[in-house]
Image (spheres, rainbow, N blue to C red):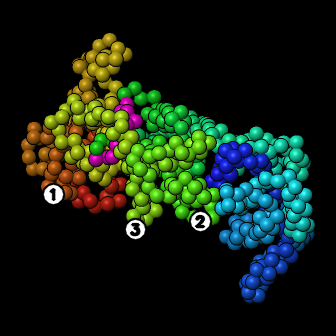
């Protein structure tokens, strides 16, 4: 529906066709449908007598009472409206609305692209949008709406309905007393008299919503990995709907990236770049979505699907500019008018993408397009290696990252170890490099403050580390001196059997989590108690680590 509105506006803008986009709003749309009209319509559409009788049983004898100030009124019959929360309600309402849509489609001239597709009305639930191109259609339109109101009990809300002039439409024409506006909101999209302004307004609106929500949720107590999951599941969920209709601009990508970065790191001094977080987990990232690549992927695949449906405006566009087949490389986009910038983007990007394979699911197809666009953008920016892998190139970092993400432990422990591996702890050594402190010495013990110092030497950490090494040595049946502290900075090892390997990783991860989050109030007794509680929870969930943790 929204794609059709976009295409109609683009056509009127290019050809200067007089077009009035009319958005109708019905007062209490679902509550005013007459039951008599509903039953007659179901019979007229050929539903069986038995089915209609079932619907009548649901609605015909329905009564309601009001409870006011402790008193209940006498029951009164409900003669209109569909039930709230009933799975059938939406379908019944669509059936009741269908005669109006059919009559309007036959009555209005609508908008036509050349000799092809004609479109006069589009609807989704109770949102009805009309394309009026001839002022002489207005009397017939008003008469049709009056007939529908009389038959169903519906009422058009003149105050909330909106009209928008596009192309050469004269705003002095009286559109049934419905006020004209420069922008209108339809299904969450902001539409204006030009496609460019419509896309800009829609993205500005949704970007503002995401930034406001990120600011509201900033103080939530979430770990790094949980914050990224929250970004995927909640914050960015608002933008994918818009991305399928309007291509995102660099400006809005930057604004969204800044809001997400601020939310993810929550004021942390040392961070890894967004490009690192967007890497795959086995490459040192956390699979953070590349906003621009996914928006492009959704936009291109949606346009492709719309163009494959015969009778749509998009199908007519693709056929007119011969965009149904793959473009040459480089693509010739100059033949497409500037008003259709979104089609230029489609032609330019699609030249480098393979079409959907036979038997390939829609989900896999979108995923492949996303990965291709992401790879193209990565190559174009000449990505550098992850910072920590540049500092220590001799380490097998693929093994380190695979070990980190294979641990059967909490997101908190995994996030803490991820920060340690990337050297993100605010030690005095790192803070002095950026002139935030005057000395590299630890504020607790006076020794040089490094990551290893914090985890194995400072205060109670030394006793905790020695106790942990003894337990690990017992698990591996070796001397405790063969358990290096370097494993804390990167688990570059493979142990056998698999259960012993996972148990070792689990102990390291929980050791780091405890030391990082309890630096000023830690003790060996509390650490042992924490480990045993965590062990009990893990034994309730899985047996992947066997009984190796019993030694704790």
Name the front one of labels 1 and 2: 2
Residue under the image location 79 percent in, 70 percent down: 99
Q: Which mark is residue 358?
A: 3
Residue on which the image places disc 1: 497
Nearer-the-camera pick, 389 or 341: 341
Tell me whether circle 1 and circle 2 mark residues in contact (CB < 8 Å): no
- Dot 1 or dot 2, earlier in sequence: 2
Indicate yes or no whether the magenta region holds residue 278. yes
Residue under the image location 50 percent in, 52 percent down: 300
Asked whether, in this view, residue 218 is left or right of residue 360, the answer is: right
Per the image, label 3 sits on a secondary structure element best described as loop
Indicate yes or no whether the magenta region holds residue 491. no
Nearer-the-camera pick, 54 or 418: 54
Measured from the top left, where is residue 35 in percent x and y?
A: 84, 73
Q: Which mark is residue 310?
A: 2
Residue under the image location 15 percent in, 36 percent down: 394
Please give the range of residues in magenta: 271-282
Residue occupying the far top of the picture: 438
- Dot 3 or dot 1, earlier in sequence: 3
Measured from the top left, where is residue 387 in percent x and y?
A: 28, 31
Per the image, label 1 sits on a secondary structure element best described as loop
């Amino acid at each position: 529906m929204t794609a059709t509105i976009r295409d109609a506006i683009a056509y009127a803008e290019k050809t200067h066709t007089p077009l009035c986009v009319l958005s109708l709003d019905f007062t209490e749309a679902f509550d005013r449908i007459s039951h008599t009209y509903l039953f007659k319509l179901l019979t007229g559409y050929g539903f069986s007598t038995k089915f209609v009788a079932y619907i009548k049983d649901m609605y015909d004898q329905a009564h309601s009472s009001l409870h006011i100030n402790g008193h209940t009124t006498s029951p009164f019959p409900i003669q209109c409206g569909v039930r709230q929360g009933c799975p059938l309600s939406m379908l019944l309402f669509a059936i009741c609305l269908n005669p109006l849509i059919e009559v309007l489609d036959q009555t209005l001239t609508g908008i036509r692209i050349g000799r092809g597709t004609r479109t006069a009305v589009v609807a989704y639930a109770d949102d009805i949008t009309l394309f009026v191109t001839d002022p002489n259609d207005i009397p017939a339109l008003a008469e049709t709406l009056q007939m529908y109101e009389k038959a169903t009990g519906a009422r058009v809300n003149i105050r909330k309905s909106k009209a928008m002039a596009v192309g050469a439409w004269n705003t002095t024409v009286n559109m049934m007393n419905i006020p004209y506006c420069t922008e209108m909101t339809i299904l969450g999209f902001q539409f204006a008299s030009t496609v460019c302004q419509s896309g800009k307004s829609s993205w500005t609106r949704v970007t503002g919503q995401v930034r406001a929500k990120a600011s509201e949720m900033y103080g939530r107590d979430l770990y790094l990995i949980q914050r990224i999951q929250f970004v995927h599941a909640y914050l960015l969920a608002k933008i994918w709907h818009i991305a399928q209709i309007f291509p995102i601009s660099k400006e809005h990508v930057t604004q969204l990236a800044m809001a997400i970065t601020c939310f993810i790191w929550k004021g942390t001094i040392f961070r890894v770049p967004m490009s690192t977080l967007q890497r795959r987990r086995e490459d040192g990232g956390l699979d953070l979505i590349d906003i621009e690549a996914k928006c492009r992927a959704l936009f291109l695949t949606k346009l492709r699907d719309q163009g494959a449906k015969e009778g749509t405006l998009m199908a007519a566009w693709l056929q007119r500019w011969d965009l149904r087949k793959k473009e040459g490389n480089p693509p010739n986009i100059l033949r497409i008018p500037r008003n259709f910038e979104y089609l230029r983007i489609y032609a330019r990007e699609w030249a480098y993408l393979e079409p959907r394979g036979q038997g390939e699911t829609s989900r896999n197809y979108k995923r492949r397009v996303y990965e291709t666009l992401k790879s193209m953008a990565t190559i174009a920016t000449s990505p550098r290696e992850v910072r920590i892998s540049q500092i220590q190139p001799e380490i097998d970092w693929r093994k380190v990252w695979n070990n980190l993400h294979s641990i059967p432990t909490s997101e908190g422990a995994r996030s803490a170890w991820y920060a340690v591996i990337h050297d993100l702890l605010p030690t005095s050594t790192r803070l002095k490099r950026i002139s935030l402190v005057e000395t590299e010495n630890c504020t607790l013990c006076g020794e040089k403050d490094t990551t290893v110092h914090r985890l194995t030497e400072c205060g109670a950490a030394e006793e905790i580390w020695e106790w942990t090494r003894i337990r690990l040595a017992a698990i591996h049946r070796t001397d405790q001196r063969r358990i290096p502290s370097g494993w804390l900075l990167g688990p570059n090892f493979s142990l056998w059997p698999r259960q012993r390997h996972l148990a070792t990783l689990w102990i390291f991860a929980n050791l780091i989590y405890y030391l990082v989050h309890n630096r000023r109030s830690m003790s060996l007794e509390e650490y042992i108690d924490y480990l045993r509680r965590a062990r009990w929870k893990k034994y309730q969930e899985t047996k992947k680590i066997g009984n190796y943790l019993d030694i704790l």
